[in-house]
């Protein structure tokens, strides 16, 4: 592996950490470069509030340590001094949450290939900014990365993230080259009714972080029959501030009106709507749920929906793929989207 690059990424992580800490301790004026980056990103995508963007950057900084990077990469036996013939990797990134394309950018650089990124119009600020910071620390990466608005052509392989509809387009368009393609996925949560208030509060973080727009955001609950939703709503009261965001509020008002007019069964706590449904992906401001009579049935239902689920928040961590409540938006470096090993894909080209 390229130890010099890893050490540069560690330095980048500490730089990001410092920016976020300064922001949280004493919000700087609008002329501060970091605040300017936050506000530019927010002006392009209203979902990217300062708070959500700083949170995303803090999570990234937490992973950019030499210890974590080396621990993640050691099993792959990556080249130490770059590749004789690096491949040109076209990367199509999503823009649902801040820096959704960060991990692919990181993986391409660490495997010694050339990154040619087509960023979402919804998230075109953060990654170029981080790359500029990294290039100042470690100049060789300046020639390893290119951001483009053009159609990807002449690439040796591609990584593309998008909806289920765009997946079919990607599958056809990139059929002649190696490709790693991703579809829509969402987070789910398995509750057993014995959760403490603290655990339910952490689950709220999995539901409301990024306004529920992340592929790891919990959009579906599996709850035992007779589950006490009133207690869940009480614990989630501190998350009511999401309603202050106009786009979230519009979604909440719209679906509330639809459910009332159609007399659809739903629960309403004033800022999120819970609706019984078999589907996994719920709209913003709506959370689907499904009741189960016993654990065996719940596990069977989760297994059936596995291809639509990115992660499962649960108390019982013995459940395959389970993560602790409050951690759905804190993926480790080895928590690959759709369960597809990006480093292995790139390293085998």
Image (cartoon, rainbow, N blue to C red):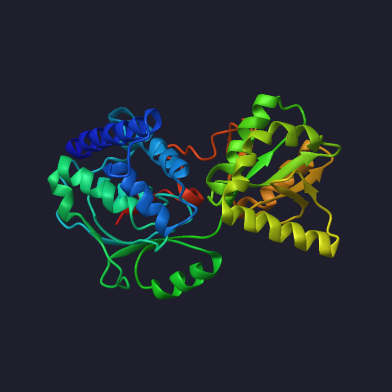
Inspect this view and state whether residue 19 appears. yes
Indicate left or right for 48 with 207 as reference.
Answer: left
The residue shown at (60%, 45%) is: 242
The residue shown at (55%, 52%) is: 213
**Front residue of 189 and 71:** 189
The image shows residue 169 at horizontal and vertical percentages of: 47, 73
Indicate left or right for 132 with 64 as reference.
Answer: left
Indicate left or right for 244 with 258 as reference.
Answer: left
Q: Check the image and report above or below for 165 versus 124.
A: below
Quadrant of the frame with the C terminus: bottom left
Corner quadrant of residue 58: top left
The image shows residue 237 at horizontal and vertical percentages of: 68, 35
The image shows residue 340 at horizontal and vertical percentages of: 46, 51
Quadrant of the frame with the N terminus: top left
**Front residue of 57 and 330:** 57
Inspect this view and state whether residue 83 appears. no
Corner quadrant of residue 152: bottom left
**How many numbered marks have been drawn onto this rendered protein structure?**
0
Corner quadrant of residue 19: top left
The image shows residue 270 at horizontal and vertical percentages of: 73, 45
**Front residue of 94 and 249:** 249
The residue shown at (17%, 36%) is: 4
């Amino acid at each position: 592996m390229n130890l010099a690059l890893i050490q540069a990424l560690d330095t980048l992580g500490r730089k990001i950490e410092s920016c976020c800490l300064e922001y949280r301790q004493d919000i700087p004026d609008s002329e501060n470069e970091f605040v300017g980056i936050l506000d530019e990103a927010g002006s392009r995508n209203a979902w990217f509030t300062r708070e959500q963007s700083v949170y995303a950057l803090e999570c990234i900084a937490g992973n950019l340590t030499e210890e974590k990077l080396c621990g993640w990469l050691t099993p792959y036996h990556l080249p130490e001094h770059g590749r004789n013939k690096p491949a040109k990797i076209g990367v199509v990134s999503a823009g649902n949450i801040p820096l959704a394309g960060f991990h692919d950018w990181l993986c391409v650089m660490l495997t010694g290939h050339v990154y040619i990124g087509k960023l979402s119009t919804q998230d075109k600020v953060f990654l170029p900014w981080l790359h500029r910071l990294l290039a100042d620390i470690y100049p060789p990466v300046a020639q390893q990365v290119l951001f483009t608005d053009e159609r990807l052509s002449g690439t040796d392989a591609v990584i593309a993230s998008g909806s289920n509809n765009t997946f079919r387009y990607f599958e056809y368009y990139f059929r002649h080259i190696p490709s790693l393609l991703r579809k829509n996925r969402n987070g789910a949560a398995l509750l057993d009714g014995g959760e403490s208030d603290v655990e339910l509060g952490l689950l709220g973080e999995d539901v409301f972080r990024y306004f529920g727009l992340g592929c790891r955001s919990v959009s579906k609950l599996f709850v035992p029959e007779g589950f006490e939703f009133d207690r869940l709503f009480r614990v989630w009261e501190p998350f009511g501030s999401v309603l202050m965001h106009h786009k979230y509020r519009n979604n909440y008002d719209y679906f509330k009106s639809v459910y009332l007019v159609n007399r659809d069964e739903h629960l309403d706590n004033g800022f999120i709507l819970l609706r019984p449904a078999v589907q996994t992906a719920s709209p913003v401001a709506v959370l689907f749920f499904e009741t189960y009579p016993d654990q065996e049935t719940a596990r069977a239902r989760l297994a059936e929906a596995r291809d639509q689920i990115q992660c499962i928040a649960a108390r019982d961590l013995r459940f395959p793929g389970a993560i602790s409540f409050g951690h759905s938006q804190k993926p480790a470096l080895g928590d690959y989207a759709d369960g597809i090993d990006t480093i292995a894909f790139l390293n085998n080209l």
